[in-house]
Image (cartoon, grey):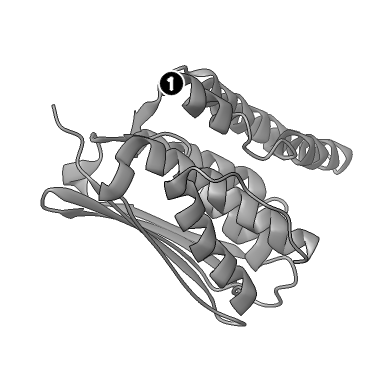
Amino acid sequence: SAIRFEMLCQQINPHFLYNTLDIINGLILNGQKDEAVRVCEMLGLMFRYNLNGEEDSTLEQEIDHTKQYLEIIQYKIQGLNTDLVCDESIRKLKIARFVLQPLVENSIKHGFAQKRGECLVSVCAQDEGDRISICVMDNGAGMLPQTVDELENMKWAVQKGIPPERNQTTAGERRRRIGLRNIYERLFVKYGRSLEFRIETRQGFGTRIMIDIPKERG
């Protein structure tokens, strides 16, 4: 329902504003006022998007929202490389809101926390006939096998309407699992059993999350 969807959207990471204000403060203290203004502009665009009451957005809007996030976060992660690609034929099609940016944020927060060297995150949205294929990939730390198992159990629990439960994983892995549950649950609310959501990961090499959804009719 719309009410349930709105409640799920409100669970999205609340620390982003604090971190962005910290970036702005650092830029001002370093005399980089033009950069600080630019970050403020991107933050304003992101909040305008968040305040839109619609349940759906176009893929183009979701990608623009993700680009705004990445432009901000690149001030925090030096050497972050990004690649966002979307087939022209599906840019105007509607999908559930708040999917791409939270997935990218999840990759950056958990995949690159201890990363040394080049950091890469990519988003690719492809036209697959009557369906849309979306892939979010990073070259970060990957996931623990236990976390992968818990995420598969999470998908089953969401489908059955079972609330999340606590366990003995680390705080970081628990936050990752909660973040992905939030995204998966919003997708499942909209697409139901027609949703395909797969996770491929290898410790030390990265993670790939693949989403396959039907095209919006009408």
Residue 180 image position (x, y, % from top left): 55, 52
Graded by Cα atoms within 10 Å as few (under 14), some (14 to 19) or many (20 or more), the crowding at tag 1 reads few
- Please identify the quadrant where the C terminus is shown: top left
Residue 52 image position (x, y, % from top left): 48, 18
User: 119 or 8, which is in the foreground?
Assistant: 8
In the shown orientation, is residue 200 left or right of residue 8? left
Residue 186 sits above or below residue 146 on the image: above
Residue 166 image position (x, y, % from top left): 73, 55
User: 60 or 182, which is in the foreground?
Assistant: 182
Residue shown at 55% from the left, 50% from the top: 181
Q: Which residue is situated farthest in the right direction here?
A: 29
Label 1 sits on a secondary structure element that is: helix
Q: Which residue is situated farthest in the left direction here?
A: 129
Residue 83 seen anywhere in this rendered image of the structure: yes
Q: How many numbered discs?
A: 1
Residue shown at 67% from the left, 29% from the top: 40
Residue 77 seen anywhere in this rendered image of the structure: no
Q: Which residue is mark 1?
A: 2
Residue shown at 71% from the left, 58% from the top: 174
User: 148 or 109, which is in the foreground?
Assistant: 148
Residue 114 image position (x, y, % from top left): 75, 72
Mark 1 residue type: Ala
Residue shown at 12% from the left, 48% from the top: 130
Please identify the quarter of the rendering in which residue 113 is found.
bottom right
In the shown orientation, is residue 137 left or right of residue 45? left
- Please identify the quadrant where the N terminus is shown: top left
In the shown orientation, is residue 106 left or right of residue 196? right
